[in-house]
Each structure stands twice: as C-alpha cells, then as structure tokens.
Amino acid sequence: MTQTEKVNRLRALMRDRAIDCCYIITSDPHNSEYVAPRFQTRAWLSGFTGSAGSAVVTQEEALVWADGRYYIQAAQEIENTPFGLMKLGASGVLGPEDWMLESLPKGSRISVDGNVFPESRAKRLEERLEKKGISLVTDLDLVGDIWAGRPGLPKGALFLHPIEYTGRTAISKIDDVRDQLKKDGADFALYVGLDDVAWLMNFRGRDIPSSMLSLAFALITHDAAFLFIDIDKVTDEIGAYFKGQKISLRPYDTVATALNQLPKGAIELNPKRVSRALFRALPAHVRVIEKEDIPYLTKAELNVTELRHQFTAGVRESVVITRFLYFVKKKAVALGMDEYDVAEKLHSLRAETEGFINESFATISAYGPNAAMMHYQATKSKRSPLQAKSFYLVDCGTQSMDGTTDVTRTVALGPLTDEEKRDFTLTLKSHIALASLPFLKYTCGIALDAVARSVMWRHNLDYKCGTGHGFGYLAGVHEGPQGLSNSPTCLYRFREHNVITIEPGVYREGKHGIRLENDYVVLKANQSIETREGKPELIEEPENINEAGDRFLRFQPLTFIPFDRASILSEMLSSEEKSWLNDYNLAIRREVAPFLNGDELDDLMKETEPF
C-alpha cells in the first residue's frame, strides 16, 4: 500500500469506530526509544523512518512531527504523501498534543494505542482534553488493525552477561531492590524498561536492532522474582542460570494477568514508562507508589568492574576509528569510494577486533551536505561519492561484552572554506568548554548543557538537539537518567561513574554538518583512569576540598580519537583550550599509539603534536 492508501484505510476505520483523530507515537510496551519492527506504526503509516517522532491523522489532516535531528530527513521522506511536516521545537510550531487541543472541536474522540502509551502521559493528556470536552480512547490499535502482514514479536536469541563483566550477580541486585522496596513501603515492583530488566538479571538479547535487548518484563516481590519473556528463547543453559538466581520464568504475554492477580499490597512502578494497558490491569486493592525504577537509577552509576571494562571498550573503539579515519582521509577518495563503501570498511575493521558483537546503532556515514541531516543513512541505493574537498562525518558505535560506545568525528577530505573551518573550530571549542569543566557534585544536566551551548550562542548558532546523552553497558546507546539538554526536564544530578557523551555540532542545510562526540565518565576531580601495564587503573590524588566542603567532579574521556588537525583554526583557541587539547592528545598517544604501526602511527603522531 502507498501512504495515501494507508491513510485512506485508516480514515475509513476511524469513521467506523467513531474516532475523530488518531494519534500515533513512537513507542512499544516498554517505552523503548528504538522499537522492534512490529511496533514501528508511525514509520509504516507515514513513511518517515526516524527513530523519534509522532503522527496525527484526522479526516482532513495528516501530520508528522519531527525534532531538529530529523527536519531534513522527514521532509524528504514524506514528500508526495498525504503528510505535512511539523518541525517540533521550531518557533511558532505547536506540538502534537497542543495542536489537537487547538484544532479539534468539543465532543471529539482521540484514539491512542494504550499498549504503548505511557500511563502518566495518558493521564496528563486526558486532564487537558477534558477541559475542552474531548475524550481519549486507549483500547484501540487502529493502525495495527489496517496493517496487513504486520511483523510478529521478535524472536532474537538470549545470551548471558557473565559475572566477570557485570561485577555482581543477579540475585544480589534483586536483593538490593527488595531492601529498597522495604524502605519505600512497597510489596511489589514492576519493571518494563528492557535495559533495566536485562541489567537487573544479567542477560541480553537480540530483539531490538543494535541494542542487545530482549522483550521482557520483571515483577519483583519480597520472596520471588518473575521474568516475563518468550519461553522459546530460553535455552537449557540459560534456564538453569535463571533457576540458580531464583528467577521464575513466565510467558511474555501473561504479565497483565499476573498484575491483575496480585494480592492486596503496594506496587512500585514508574508511570512514565508503564503503559496505560498494564496500569489498568492492576486491581483496585493494589496501591500504586509512583517512583523512578530502582534498576534505572542504580545502573546509571557504573560499578568498578563495569567502569574498567567500559574504559577498555572505549580504547579498543578508539583504535578502530583512528585507523578508519586514516584510511578515509588518505585512501578513500583515490579509490573512488562513497559513503556506503567506507561504512562497510569500518564494519570490516571492527569485525577484526576481539569481542565485537555488532554496531550499537546504524552507522551514520555522511559526506558534505548529507551530514547536515543528523541521522542521515547511506544505503546501497542512496549513497554519495567522497570528494577531495569539504567534510566527511562518521557517527558510530559498537556493542561488546565489555561495553557500549558512541563516537563522532568530522574530518576534512581536502580544501575547506573559511566558514567550514570556523564552524569546526566553534564545535571543538563548545566540546572543550564542557569536557574541561570541573563542576559541583549533583549539578543537573540542563546547567551543564548551557556551558557547551553558550559557545554557539555567542556566535548566533544553536544545535537543535541535546549536548549529550547517557548510554548503556552492553545495552541501549541512549539511556538515562543522565543527559545534557536544554529541556526543562533535564534535571538529573550528575555523580561519580555516570557515563555521558558530549557532542555539540553545527548543521548548515545544503552545505555541511559537523559533530564532535566523545564518551566520558564522571569521576571525582582528583581521580583519573588510564591504562597501566595493560590494564585500566583508577588513579586518585589527594582531594582538594574548599572551606565550604564542596566536592567537584570532572569528565574523564573514555574514547581517544584525534580531532582533525587540518580543520582547526588554532588562532581561535584560547591558551586554556589548547592546554586541554594537548593533554587529550597525550592521552591519545598513551592509549592508542601502542596498537598502531607504520603510516598509521606516523599520522597519529602528527595529528597529536602540541598546539
């Protein structure tokens, strides 16, 4: 079916069900960012394939909302369809829910799929709609009803995450949850986040592309731990492991029934993640305690075992990307390669490394104007050749047993314009401003975001996305609660062993896109981590506490890849910025140089000469 045919069928079904507006979000029963094909309803209906966005269809209108990362991509993908583009965050553009409130008359009925719509969001929307006499229907999946050949639930294999990487057993983590439940006065806890469930019970899966996660729910009581999962995926070995950790298995699709049969008591859950359908499965005699999920908060602070392994994963990735960028700059253009070709080359380099499982997301390999689309994807049928001028951008990451990575570099393939060099140096200055900053313990993400973003603001620029995000440990490449954003909800307070990316950028449509991204871990200001005698070692100097007793933290790099020297206007850098850059380059030599030789090593030494 074409997008027009799909919209026409949806509108006919809406008329049949007395629905005036169908609201489609990007989600699944676990409130995941990246969803399995079965739950990609917005992409299937509209043709816009970005990882985030929403759609609204009425009898007169069909609209897609995309944020700043996807303005260009969305406009291209919905061209010649019934859908119009709403640029979320742009001046004067209403969000989807505000648009519905403004546009729909009293008495209208809006349908959302309650199986994927979070309870807190449904409740807030209902409260707003009621004031206008509009009702919200949450027990219909209208797009699913017209989707012929809709994919089934994924059947990705499970695997265990061994104690040598996790540092803790599942049973010890579950016991910690129980201890906290007692303090909170709760009898049960429901966890729906795939990353939380996998981390808590020390397993991973292959249901969600690139994220190493499996569809599952966890229900914890004071004397039992239940894992709701596709039983067919559980091998004898994995089943024996779960039994040894006192984890009882239940079929994935029985979680609502289990909730409905809970005895009297109190359940702890996060309504921002739990769907409307599961929330309404709870019986009246079960009291709800609304809190952030315990695993969600706990795993945000790496333990020492996780930290050391994540550092090793970052160094290994840095070696691969350094080798790859040498190839791109020195050989790719002469070989007549394009964006897709070099992405394949990167994959082949990664496949040679120990422990590589797969990419943590689809590699963004973008030349010239294509890089202005933050989430551009080169394909076999859509690929631009590399040329001996302007910029090439690669945003990429890996999954390995010892961690997850996400890095971006932009490099010159030939002569650059003054504007290109200026934009690159501004991006580097923005990155250094935050990466070099000592900050008070428990500073929130919105405050830290402004440090990097203010560099751009001084030059009448802004990047329409966050400055950085947390990432999982052999899990999702975007994980909270930590984040760096100018959103008023970015209030998590940073502490030791949080991991975060820093990735400012400049994006000029039709010209170029620049992004410079490293992975970092938060340490005490007097701590650092480096490789010594082949192993990561956490180093601690005497702590300097001021008269007020303030404790300061710092960002420690986890990835060590040169910033493209040919693209930097050194006269724009302050002495402090040059000092940070020189220290970073010394760290690159220490961590990466031992794994290189020949021309690759010679090039690294030139790229990391002192400024």
Image: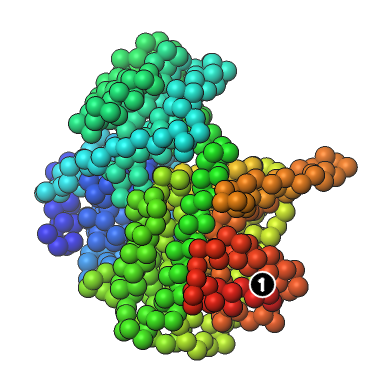
| Mark 1, other Cα within 10 Å: few <14 / some 14–19 / many ≥20 | few
- Hey, which quadrant is residue 298 in on the image? top right
Query: Residue reaching furthest right?
Result: 547
Residue in front for this viewpoint, 44 or 362:
362
Q: Is residue 204 above or below residue 345?
A: above
> Can you name the residue that lies furthest to the top here?
264
Looking at the picture, tell me which residue is in the foreground, 438 or 258. Answer: 438
Horizontal and vertical percent position of residue 73: 34, 68
- The picture places residue 525, in percent across and down from the top left corner, at 73, 49
Q: Is residue 297 visible?
A: no
> Does residue 393 show up?
yes
Q: Tell me: residue 53, above or below residue 381.
A: above
Quarter the C terminus occupies:
bottom right
Residue 558 on image: x %, y %: 56, 54
Q: Residue at x 39, y 50 (%)?
A: 355
Image position of 394 with respect to 368: above or below? above
Q: Residue at x 36, y 60 (%)?
A: 352
State the residue position of label 1. Answer: 458
Assign a secondary structure to mark 1. Answer: loop
Position of the N terminus by quadrant: bottom left
Q: Is residue 60 left or right of residue 167?
A: left
Amino acid at circle 1: Arg
